Amino acid sequence: MIRSIHAVRIGLLMAGAAVLLGWVIRHSEASFADGLRYIHRAERIQAEGFQNGLVSGVDHPLHPLGIAVIHKLLGGTDPASWQLAALVLCFTSAVLLVVPVYLLALELFGEQAAWMACALVVVNPIVGYVVVNVLSESTFLLWWTFSLWGAVRFLREGRFIWLPLAIAFAALAYLTRPEGMLLPAALLATLLLVPVLRATRINWPRWWQAMAFLLGGMVVLVGPYVLAKGGLGTKPGVARVLGLAPGSQPLALEREKPLADGQSALDTYRIACVRMAKVFRAAVTPPLFLFAVLGLGLAATNRSRIRAWLFLTIVLAASAVGLVRLHATGGYCTVRHGLVPGLLLTIVAAHGVTWLMGKAAIPGRWLGLSCQRLRPGPAVWSALILFFVVIPNIRFLGPLNAGPFSVYHETGRWLARNTDVDGMVLDLTDWSLYLSDRPGYLFANVYEAPLDSKTRWIVARKPHVEGHWHYSQVLRDRIAGREPVALVPPDAGPDRVQIRIYDLNSPAKETAAKPNPDALDTRVR
């Protein structure tokens, strides 16, 4: 009976998640081009076979493999079919995320926190963001949260049946993104600390068995891939965080802003710590951050799950260190990089919310109605919390448009109709050029493309041209005051994406500064 009640709740929550994410997809526009890299990898997997496609490339293979499988099922040959396959995979993963979130919150805090945690996770704008942009975090979070649940169950109960579950899903998370290795590393650190603390000790035979099972399982499941890749990961950001590669160049494209001349290491890490704190707060959404702090305080008093909280504390601490290193060595750290601690803190915030609901509401009365006086019940509290979470973040669900990626589809059609092979296109959105199914330069070539005399068209969003980034000045120099020859869509409000298309063969304004090829060449180097 109890299991059926949980199953019904999970089903209803998944249905709600599907409706909300469907609305987000219908009304949001992509703002990030990383998803295209996974699509290209999926195309390569399908063209070259799984063996070559899985090992090659800088990204871990499971997300593009999933895109390739979905595309095989759906069919199609044009770029839009690949985009649809990626979107279906990310949407499905985000809806299924309800299951492990519910199970994890149920294990840690009970029934009331379980459904509240799912609701808060689903309405978090960052979840819709990773789905719309077909990023690997959507599939990664699914495996990661299942592994987290298995690890927590094992640490609380000590039953070995949960350890293989944690290891298997941790391996899937690692094969999706390199951050997946954080979970088995945190579990290993927890097992190493367990004998030190009297309240967490387990008998030695079981401790040795758990250590051997964890290390052996990870070696068997991910060892062949690590050997084939020659390391834990080949992404430059991972190598920089681990200290295996030097930091980004001062003017590197991935930096949020150029590295200041003479900036000391102390200032670098101070700025990185501030950025990490902002990411933590934004990942759980600012209205919920105080509830997360309250939930952490309440959890610290729960002695029955002390091993689990030791483990989760290590996960949060390691995530914080990783984000600080990411910003210090790479010059960037966005909310999507804080999804791991953000998900955990959102679940903790749900505990804080339900605790307050229990203190303020009349037991057994859903609306809180009473003959003596009116006090808010769980339904009222739930509506208030969701209201205060959704309203401040509604603008962050994405610029509103007529349909998924419609602006980029229309721009791609414009490029296919109006450009030829003699005039190269520099597309800073990446999506438009891909959907036009023609060659050209992408955002990564923003410094090299202006030097090519064949570059005729520049496709960009307004922030690309008018922004404060170093490449924005390069674009302004190359555009030289020209007006766009096309705007897609022609009329756009402040919450809509608009693509500008410039023709460099059109006459430049006489008052505009002419581009300096030598200066451009210096920036490239």
Image (cartoon, rainbow, N blue to C red):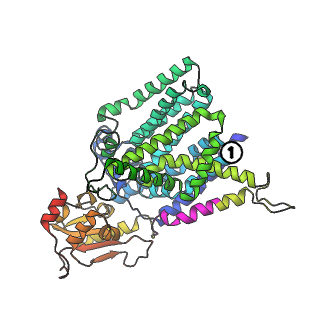
Residue at image mark 1:
111
Residue 426 pos. (x, y %): 24, 64
Residue 351 pos. (x, y %): 64, 48
Q: Secondary structure at mark 1?
A: helix
On-image quarter of the C terminus: bottom left
Say which of 503 and 316 sits in front.
316
For residue 397: magenta?
yes
Residue 398 pos. (x, y %): 46, 64
Q: Can you see residue 7?
A: yes
Rendering quarter of residue 65: top left
Look at 27% across and 67% down and name the residue there: 472
Say which of 313 and 226 sits in front.
313
Residue farthest top in this picture:
205
Look at 45% across and 43% down and name the residue there: 319
Rendering quarter of residue 423: bottom left
User: Which stretch appears magenta?
Assistant: 385-400
Q: Main secondary structure of the magenta part?
A: helix
